[in-house]
Amino acid sequence: MSEIKFKNVTKRYGNQQVLRGVNATWEAGKIYALLGRNGAGKSTLLRIVNNRTFATGGAVTLDGKSVVENEAAQNRIFLMSAAQLYPADRKLTWLFALTRQMYGDFDDELAKHLLAAFELRDSAKLGQLSTGYQTIARLIIALCVPCDFVLLDEPVLGLDAPARELFYQELLATYAQRPRTFVIATHLIEEVATLVENVNVLAGGEIVLAEDVATVLAKGRIVSGPAGLVADYLRDTPVMRKQALGGMLTAYTLDAPLERPLPAGVTLDAMDLQRLIIELTRGERHEK
Amino acid sequence: MHFDASSVVPLYHQIAQQFTAGILSGAFPEESQIPSTTEVARSYAINPATVLRGMNELVDAGVIEKRRGVGMFVVQGAQAKLAAAQQAEFFAAQVPRVVRQAKALGITAGQLTAAIEGEYNHE
Amino acid sequence: MKSKALFRSLANTVLVSMVVMVVTTAIVIVGLPLLLDQHDFSLGDLLIAIDVAFGGMMLIDVGVDQAFQNGVTRRTMRRVGAALLLPLVVLGAAALLVMQAVVRLIGANPVSLVTPYVKGVFGGPVWAPVLVGLAMALFALLGVIGGLAMRGRGKRVTTWISVVAFTVAGLLIGTAMILGDTTIHAAVLTGPRLAIGLPAAGVAPRPWLAAAWLLALDALVGWLAWRGVAQVETGAK
């Protein structure tokens, strides 16, 4: 099955080292969340995949062949981002037709359905739409391209809650109909938590976590209670952070020893993805 | 149906739990069709792989069956099976927890039994 | 095929606009002096050249971003760009030569840097088109370089620069029209004129020298444009 592989990908902008050796694999037909703080390099990474910018070092391959200046590979990859790269004076119908010519195919039926669902007319000119609707127009295109790997960089920025929910539903609907890889880069973790199958967390210029959501949530816990009991419960367990207050201790771990009996007075709380990201990216220098 | 992404209970298991509740309550009668994986995924914005995993739990438990080309159906006798399973779960997990807590609080077996019987009579 | 799709997209937008622009400019350059009853048609080639440069800039402005959005490689961008520059150059060159012919036909005096090389109504069969073609190619490529340099600088800067370029050219032409032929010739110094093969101080024009200069400049600017596209990127988002 196809996959996009990252091998030690680095990227430097002048003095700033944004990516310090990214290693990851994106498999066919799965939905990924690419999580990380603002300025972590998510957009840069996606732009490297889509041949919009060059990596300083390392390699990005699709089926073993580099994606750089590789039109056959780029024909299977699509990136939708905040960048408005289409000519603004064109109607949506023109854009759909252009996309069809460029990618060899375009799901006109789905486009029609989505236009209706979002209440957008295909006779609208892109530049005359509000920012939110421009985003929606680009999202529609992203869902209708025949590409195997669709990258979405902060796809719902500027959309109101109902539009966001509608987008997630439509994304899942088309994914169920025609499974392909979606990579959603976002900092709105809570909203995509149920949507995605896998998470990749980009922190410190590297992928520090690449795991499926169920596994992460299965053993991620916040353990609280009397310091001694918590410490004993968590002996030999890798802990991300400990927070002491008086005689109480709160510890954050990705690998709670659930098989051990929980001492009375010690509580286990779920570590949701939001909390996980905060803990994983804690202390990371905020570059932007 | 409602799903909590922040719960300690994995999402796929929540799906199994909610369908279980639906079957036990009669909302999904035996021999009737239940919503497909795609429908559930769409409606609740949950990844289809996760939904499938939850449904497969119930398939493995012999409570749901996939009928090729049609969909997923509640098996005859599912209610009884589920009720039995839940009882077993209660005895395996809940009871020991209560007893452990009682012991930690210094409550004797006799006190606990008396309290339990009292509750039954209260009904 | 992405190259075909990109070519068609840009041909239908940029090239069409350019035809309108160049034809309009040519009509104005020839028509305005006629209206004002002037007999010297001065430096119209500069305006056409700027049009062509603008065309080069527009190709970058309109073409690169949509190419990136649609997975087009830089290699394809260069090939399609080169294929689009050819008609643009031909358009500009043809406009210039037609303008020359028309002005001569009505018996007036065309003043332009092309004039010395043009003998008779349609000029020397070889040198006029060659020199004009090379010159237009230079301006088109300069437009491309300008477009690449402007990327990321925003639409307003690009618009302002275009406005300034056209204003300067317009002023030069207006001045030429008012002050007349001799002032223009005097304005361009004898030394440089001789160096690049233009007629000056009684020396006959040497088209081969002008051609050599233009070829060299074309090669240099063309190489810069080629490399520029090879390294082009989208902005931070």
Image (cartoon, coloured by chain):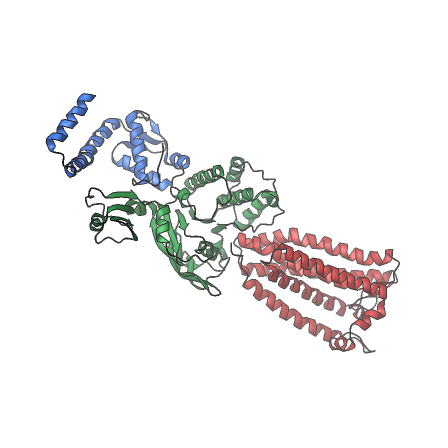
What chain is colored red? C
The total of numbered circles placed on residues is 0
Does residue A47 lie above or below B53 as drawn?
below
Does residue C138 lie above or below B65 as drawn?
below
Q: Tell whether C228 sits left or right of B74.
A: right
Q: Tell whether C85 sits left or right of C233.
A: right
**x then y, percent, for residue B85:** 21, 32
Residue situated in front as seen by the camera: A61 or A252: A252
> For the point 19% across and 46% down, which residue is it?
A260
**x then y, percent, for residue A278:** 37, 50
Which shade is chain B?
A: blue
**x then y, percent, for residue C6:** 59, 53
> For the point 74% across and 56% down, which residue is it?
C22
The reply to whether residue C87 is visible in this rendering is no
Q: Tell whether A185 sits left or right of C124.
A: left
Does residue A25 lie above or below C49 as drawn?
above
**x then y, percent, for residue C109:** 86, 65
> For the point 44% across and 54% down, which residue is it?
A42
Which shade is chain A?
A: green
Does residue C194 lie above or below C146 as drawn?
below
The reply to whether residue B11 is visible in this rendering is yes
Residue A191 falls in image quadrant: top left
